[in-house]
Image: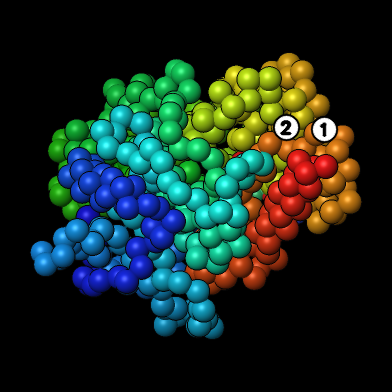
Amino acid sequence: MEENLHRVSRSPDVGTHNQNDSVAEDNRRRRHYNHHTHGVQAKDSADWNAVDDLDFEILNFHSSPSNADDDMDFEIVNFHSSPSSPSPVVTNDEPLRLPIPMSGLGVPNEQLFVTQRSLPELARGPPYFYYENVVLAPWETISRHLYDVAPEFVDSSFICAAARERGYVHNLPISNRYLIQPPPKHTIQEVLPLTKNWWPTWDTRTKLNCIFTVNASSQLTNRIRSALEASRGEPPEEIKRYVIEQCEKWNLIWVGQNKAVPLEVNEIETLMGFPIYHTRGGGGISRAERLKSLSNSFQVDTLAYHLSVLKPLFPDGINVLSLFTGIGGGELALHRLQIPMKTVVSVEFSQANKYILRDFWERTNQKGVLIEFEDVQDLTKDIIVELMKQFGGFDIVIGGSPCNNHAGGNRVTPNCLEGEQSLMFYEYCRVLNVVRQTAKEMRRS
Ligand code: SAH
C-alpha cells in the first residue's frame, strides 16, 4: 500500500464527526488492526477507469507520535484534471477521504468493529434509508443532503471474492449484523474451482477486481497465450508482469494451459451474490445488457450483511420503496435474509431490468405486492403519500442512484452531481424527505 502513496500529510477532518468517542476509539483500533492483517486492496472498476483519466494525488494520514490518540489512518485522494483532459474542471467539493482499510463500520470475522454510532438527530429512526454509490462520488455533498450521516465505505472483497469499493449512507442499526447463509466463498479459486487446474503459481491473485462492463478483447487473450507459449516453461519476469497486469485490469481467469479469459455472465452473477441466470430474466436480454446491469448492481452479500439487522425488526414483513432498482439486488438480499416483502414499490427505468425483477419475483414465488414505476420523477409527493396511506408507510427506502457521471469512462468530473444521470441522487433525497416527513405526520395523526 505504502508504495502507492505520493505524499504524506495530515487532514483536519477525518469524517467521523457523527461518531461518539468510544466509537472513534474502536475505529482507530480497528483500522490499525486491519492495516496489519489485510493486503493491498483491489481496485474498483470505476477507479480503474479513473486512473486512466486523472492524475491522482494520494495523501496518507499517519499517526503522529506526539498526539497519537487524536489520529486516524485515512487516505485522502485529490483529483487534478490531467493535461490531456479537454476542459479542466474546478471542483467545489471535497477531496475524497477514504478509510484504510475499507471495512466500514465492521465486516464479518473482524475482531474489532463498531457496535454503535450516534446518528444526527434528523436521521434517526424509521423509515430507514440506505443509499449506495461509488467511492469516487462526492460524499460530502451526498452526506450533507442525507441528514449529515457519514458514509460507510466497504470493499466487498472483505466479504466475497470480488472487490467492490462502495460508499453507503444509511441510518440502519449496525449491531448484530450477520452474513446470509451459505456464506459467500472468499477466493476466486473457491468460487471457480475449475480454474485451479490452470492457475499459474506466479499469478498470486485470490480476489477479482470489481466487475465492469467492458470485457477484454480476444486479441488480448490471444496475445497473452502467444507470449506464454513462446516462453516455454516458466515465463520471464517481464512477461509475468505484463500478464498479471492485464489479468488484474480485465479480471481474467485461467481456463486452460496459458488461457486467460474474461468472466462469463453466470460467473459474474455468482461473484455478485446472485443466483446464476438471474439476469437472463426469462429471455430476450442481450449479454451486453446483462453485463451492464451487473456492473451497476449491489454486491448482494455485502448489502445483505448491512440489511440483516432488519430481520428481527420486521418479523411480519417489510414495505420497501426501491429506487433505481436495477436488477433487484436489494430485493434479492431481503429474500435471502427471509424477510418477507409485503410491498415493493420499484422505480426502474430500464425495460431489461424490469423484466429481470419480475422474473425474480415470479420465480421466487413472492407473496407480496410488486408495484412498478418507470421514472423516479413521476413519483410526485401526492403519489408517494397515497401509496404510504395504502400500505401503512414504507419501512425502508433503498437505492443506489445512477453514477454514470462520476464513475468509469463516462465520468465528467470526479465529484459532480450535475450530469443528467447523477442528478438522480437529488431525486432520491426528494423522495426520501417526502417519505420521512409523511411517516412523521402519519405517526402524529
Ligand atoms: N442498485 C441497483 C442498480 C442501480 S444502477 C442494482 O442492484 O441493480 C441505477 C439504475 O437506475 C439503473 O438500473 C437505471 O436504469 C436506473 N435509472 C436511471 N434513471 C432513472 C430514472 N429517472 N428513474 C428510474 N430509474 C432510473
- Point 35% across, 41% down: residue: 114
The label on residue 319 is: 2
Give the quadrant of the C terminus.
Answer: top right
Asked if residue 394 is positioned above or below residue 79 in the image, the reply reads above
User: Residue 72's image quarter?
Assistant: bottom left
Residue 426 in the image: state x and y as whole percent: 68, 61
Asked whether residue 41 is in view, the answer is no
- Point 25% across, 58% down: residue: 73
Give the quadrant of the N terminus.
Answer: bottom left
Is 18 left or right of 314, judged from the image as shown?
Answer: left
Labels 2 and 1: the sequence-earlier one: 2
User: Residue 367's image quarter?
Assistant: top right
User: Are circles 2 and 1 on residues that touch, CB within 8 Å?
Assistant: yes
Asked whether residue 38 is in view, the answer is yes
Give the residue type that dot 1 points to: Phe
Residue 348 in the image: state x and y as whole percent: 75, 45
Is 295 left or right of 201, judged from the image as shown?
Answer: right
Residue annotated with mark 1: 391
- Point 48% across, 43% down: residue: 211
Mark 1 crowdedness (10 Å alpha carbons): few <14, some 14-19, many ≥20:
few
State how far apart marks 2 and 1 are (Cα).
8 Å
Residue 241 in the image: state x and y as whole percent: 22, 51
- Point 38% across, 25% down: residue: 185
Count of labels shown?
2
Instruction: Say which element carries label 2.
Output: strand
> Considering depth in this image, is 291 or 34 the residue closer to the camera?
34
Residue 257 in the image: state x and y as whole percent: 30, 30
Give the residue type that dot 2 points to: Asn
Q: Residue reaching furthest front?
A: 444
